[in-house]
Image: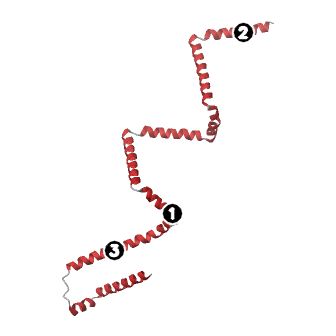
Amino acid sequence: MTTSTNGADQLEHLVKAANDALTDDMVSRIAQTAADGMDLIDQVNRAGLARALPALTSLVDNGDLDRLVRLARVYGSAEDALTDDMIGRLSETVGDGLVTLDRFNRGGAGKLVSILERMQDTGSLDRLADTLPALVDRLGQVEKLLAALEKADATTARQDPAGGGIGGIFKLLTDRDNQDALRHLVNLGKALRGASKA
C-alpha cells in the first residue's frame, strides 16, 4: 500500500511540476500548434493528398524528386539571371518569330506543306533529292554558258566589222581557235539533235 501511495504521490508531484512550469503563453502556443496541426491534417485529407503519397514515395525511391529539385534550382537561377533588358530582347525575338510564322502562313505555306506531303507519298521527293546535286551541277553549266555568250557578245562588239569575201572566210577558217569553236558547235548541234529524238 505504501508503494502505490508513493507512486501516486510522485505522479501528483510530476503533474504539479508540469503545471507550474507551463506558462499561459506556452499553453496557448501548444494549443495553437495542435489546432494548426489538426487543420493541416484536415486539409491534406480533403485535398486527397493521401492518394499522392505512393507516387511521392516512388519519386523519392527513384531519385526523381532530387532531379526535380535540381531542375527547379536551375530554373530559379536562370530566372534570377535574366535582366529586364534580356527579357525584352527575348520577347522581341519571340514576337518577330511569330510575325515571320504568320507571314509564312499567309504566303501559302500550307499549300507548300501539302505539296511536299504528296511528293513524299508518291516518292517524288526522294527522286528530287537524288537528282538535285546533278541539277545544281547543270545549273552551273548553264551559268557558264550564259557567261560565255555575254563574253562573246562583248568581244564581237569591240571588233571591227568583217571585210567579207572568200579571203576573210579563208583567214577565219585557218585559225586553230576558230576551228575548235566550229567543231564544238557541230558537236553541240549533234547532241541537241540526239536529245530531241530521245
| Residue 149 percent coordinates (x, y) | 29, 76
Separation (CA) of disc 3 from disc 2: 114 Å
Say what amino acid the circle numbered 3 marks: Lys
N-term mark: 3 or 1: 1
Label 2, on which residue? 10
Numbered badge on residue 120: 1
- Residue drawn at 25 percent across, 77 percent down: 153
Query: Which-is-in-front pick, marks 2 and 1?
Result: 1
Query: Element type at marker 3?
Result: helix
Q: Is residue 118 above or below residue 73?
A: below
Label 3, on which residue? 144
N-term mark: 2 or 1: 2
| Residue 73 percent coordinates (x, y) | 50, 38
Instruction: Using residue 150 as the reference point, say whether residue 9 is left or right of it.
Output: right
Disc 3 crowd rating (10 Å Cα; few below 14, some 14-19, many 20+) is few
**Dividing the image into 4 quarters, which one contains the C terminus?**
bottom left
| Residue 105 percent coordinates (x, y) | 41, 53
Separation (CA) of disc 2 from disc 1: 93 Å
- Residue drawn at 57 percent across, 39 percent down: 66
Q: Quadrant of residue 194?
A: bottom left
Say what amino acid the circle numbered 1 marks: Gln
Instruction: Using residue 59 as the reference point, say whether residue 73 is left or right of it.
Output: left
Q: Quadrant of residue 170?
A: bottom left
| Residue 91 percent coordinates (x, y) | 39, 43
- Residue drawn at 65 percent across, 36 percent down: 54
